[in-house]
Image (cartoon, rainbow, N blue to C red):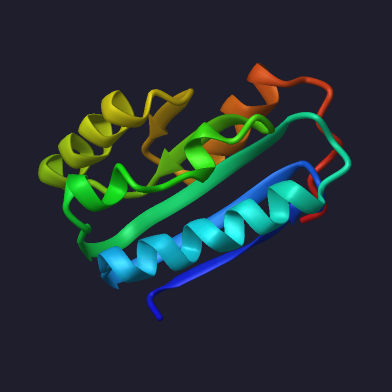
Amino acid sequence: MPYDVKWLIEDYIVSQRFWGVFTADEALAADARVIELLEHSPQTTVHAIVDDAQVTQMPPVTALAKVKSSRHDKLGWTVIFGNKSAGMRFTTKLANRILGFKMLITPTYQEAIEKLYELDPDLPPLDD
């Protein structure tokens, strides 16, 4: 299972981390977990932060198009960071065009966090 999905800030920011060869089945399983967290949050808007720094292979774009959390009413911004591969960034951007959600890509975790707080200044503080 090359993924981990959990709260970064409970009810406000979902943290997703992927690594290695990330398959279509794993993408759908991770998506189901994200939907579960979104559904259980009392907030109307929940953001996501995604670490794909250690992904060596993404699922095909056709598989990513089946992801449902990106169209969930509660999902706000998704900020992706970490992967330096031009091919991976291209796949991510292509998936974003297909799925049509609010997404940004930053090089580092710190920049991803800063961007989320710029986009939503009402987020509670992050406990380090």
Which residue ends up furthest to the left in the rendered image?
87
| Count of numbered circles in the view | 0
Specify whether 27 is left or right of 118: left
**In front here: 46 or 126?**
46
Can you say which quadrant of the picture contains the N terminus? bottom left
**In front here: 45 or 10?**
45
**Quadrant of res 55:** bottom left
Whether residue 122 is visible: yes
At 25% from the left and 31% from the top, the residue drawn is 93
**Quadrant of res 33:** bottom right
Can you say which quadrant of the picture contains the C terminus? bottom right
Give residue 83's position: percent from left, percent from top: 28, 49
Specify whether 88 is left or right of 42: left
Whether residue 111 is visible: no
Specify whether 39 is left or right of 102: right
Give residue 102's position: percent from left, percent from top: 48, 23
At 36% from the left and 31% from the top, the residue drawn is 99
Q: 109 above or below 16?
A: above
Give residue 84's position: percent from left, percent from top: 23, 46
Q: 60 above or below 81?
A: below
Which residue ends up furthest to the bottom in the rendered image?
1
At 16% from the left and 53% from the top, the residue drawn is 60
Give residue 79's position: percent from left, percent from top: 49, 35
**In front here: 38 or 91?**
38
